Image (cartoon, rainbow, N blue to C red):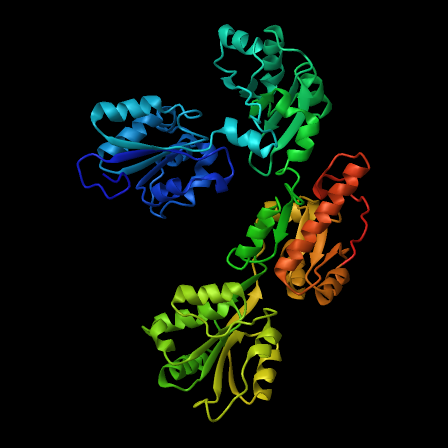
Amino acid sequence: MNPTAPNHSASGQVTFLGAGPGDPGLLTLRAVEALASADVLIADPQVLDVVRVHARAQVDTPLQASADEASIPGSPHGVSALRDTANLVMAAARAGKRVVRAVTGDPGLDGYVAEEMLACAAEGIVFEVVPGIAAAVGVPAYAGVPLRDAQGTDVRFIDARSADDRCWSELGTSDATAVVSTSLDSVAAAAGELVAAGRKPDTPMTVTVAGTTTRQRTWTATLGSVAQVLKAAKVLPSPDGGQPVIAVVGERSAAAQRDQLSWFENKPLFGWRVLVPRTKEQAASLSDQLVSYGAVPHEVPTIAVEPPRTPQQMERAVKGLVTGRYEWIAFTSVNAVKAVREKFEEYGLDARAFAGIKVAAVGEQTAKALVAFGVKPDLVPSGEQSAAGLLEDWPPYDPVFDPIDRVFLPRADIATETLVAGLIELGWEVDDVTAYRTVRASPPPAETREAIKGGGFDAVLFTSSSTVRNLVGIAGKPHNVTVIACIGPATAKTAEEHGLRVDVMSPEPSVHKLAEALAEFGAARRDAALEAGDPVTRPSERRPGARRRRATP
């Protein structure tokens, strides 16, 4: 029986799923598959956002609903529902639902779900277990602390919250690498237990909080010095002392070794909050690239798209597509694809209306939007993804081979004339049609505006002069500690005209080259701090008003 296949029996089925220690990329393929077929999602609060993105829009999340209800004064049911997740799981399964019970880390090692599994077994409810990466395994890997080497040292896992004297005694007399699950304010106590049980005070130790996320921080100490190290780092005392940590005790966690193996926290933009003034759809591939550098992208739309004031021109052009008026249609943006698609749907048309028409597209995202519509572009620039790049590859009109000499160009109301002029020069007639209007977007939430003006962002990427003007207009000027990165000289000039100091310039007019340039800036900044013996900090952690050197392009 396939546990994820639709189940039409009286009782449903339950998937106990490990969501990993925090990084969304650590979900397994099997976990994503199970989430996509779930009717009900019951997740630990720490991983709800990680797993929910892979579930259907209609999925029921009763645990979240209970949490919301519990926050309402006088709610009679919220607290009891939160305390008894097992009841939620069983109730949904009895109703014939496909239930995913998602826990932090791995169900067998991190999740206390054995009783829920036994309850399913007692009632004959089908269940399965999808393992996840346990925190005790994943966090050390992200901290640059291998648990074993060629010598095959033993590894012992211990939960300090439930460990008894016998556990500490066995671990204290062993030379095994110890992986201790505890809380930040209990690390020193756990270290003391190990020393009291026989471990040497100079045994190396690492302590990692928020492991596998961009909030991860790792401190290197010894069993005898960990309390002083955390105090000197101003980590303790803290109101956040109860947050979970993974501590690794043993020679594998020595500082000299971790300096070479700390791949995650050494990413060039690790933990940087980077403002991307684009919509989520436009910024998708750019945000993915920033994440690969360790950054936390935050998309803020600076423009909004509206229909043209007079739709008649667009309506005539779309009808012309159907009647054979055009040889080519050229899309220069995702918004242009969206505008034509919406007009098609209004007339009851679909991608078949493009039969016999050649389609050109500028940019990877534009091409993807066309493929999603069911249209494969015939022409995409082989070089620069711009109007100029498209013209480089566009064939001149040839009356022998081209039965029709007309091109349909749906575009924004503020687009430049470069493509139109170039096509005319190649011998084509162009129907230059306003498919949509771009207007300044509404201001972002107050919290985002305050972060922009108060230095809460580490960097902002400006991809055009209009993004500079619009962001300043709707949200205010970025703080002077924020790194300003611009896609080219014209954008940089506009930024400087608005009183911004430009730190990074892309070597080419490409958003991906811009992100790459920012990563190089971040790496150079990090190297300079290490060489000077200074702590590595993010720009937002610097003293307000501190001066910065301008980066060379």
Quadrant of the rendering where the N terminus is positioned: top left
Residue at (80, 44) in percent of width and height: 545
Is 104 on the left-hand or right-hand side of 537?
left
Q: Residue at x 42, y 40 (%)?
A: 28
Rendering quarter of residue 388: bottom right
Against 44, residue 195 (above or below) is above
Residue 409 sits above or below residue 335 on the image: below
- In the image, residue 526 sits, relative to residue 502, either above or below, namely above
Q: Position of residue 91 (x, y in %)?
A: 26, 31
Q: Quadrant of residue 75?
A: top left
Work out whether 195 lies above or below 457.
Answer: above
Name the residue: 48% across, 33% down.
46
Give coordinates of residue 418: x percent, y percent. 62, 79
The x, y position of residue 249, in whole percent, is: 60, 19
Nearest the eye: 90 or 131: 131
Circle count: 0
- Please state which of residues 435 and 75 is positioned toward the viewer in this rendering: 435
Query: Which x, y percent locates residue 404?
Result: 44, 89
| Residue at the image point whose x is 43% and y is 90% from the top | 403
Q: Residue most toward the left?
A: 10
Residue extending furthest toward the bottom: 400
Q: Is residue 396 visible?
A: yes
In the drawing, does residue 37 fall left or right of residue 422? Answer: left
Residue at the farthest front position: 150
Question: Quick check: 350 left or right of 478?
Answer: left
Tell me the quadrant of the picture where the C terminus can be found.
bottom right
Q: Is residue 526 left or right of residue 41?
A: right
Q: Can I make out residue 434 in this image?
A: no
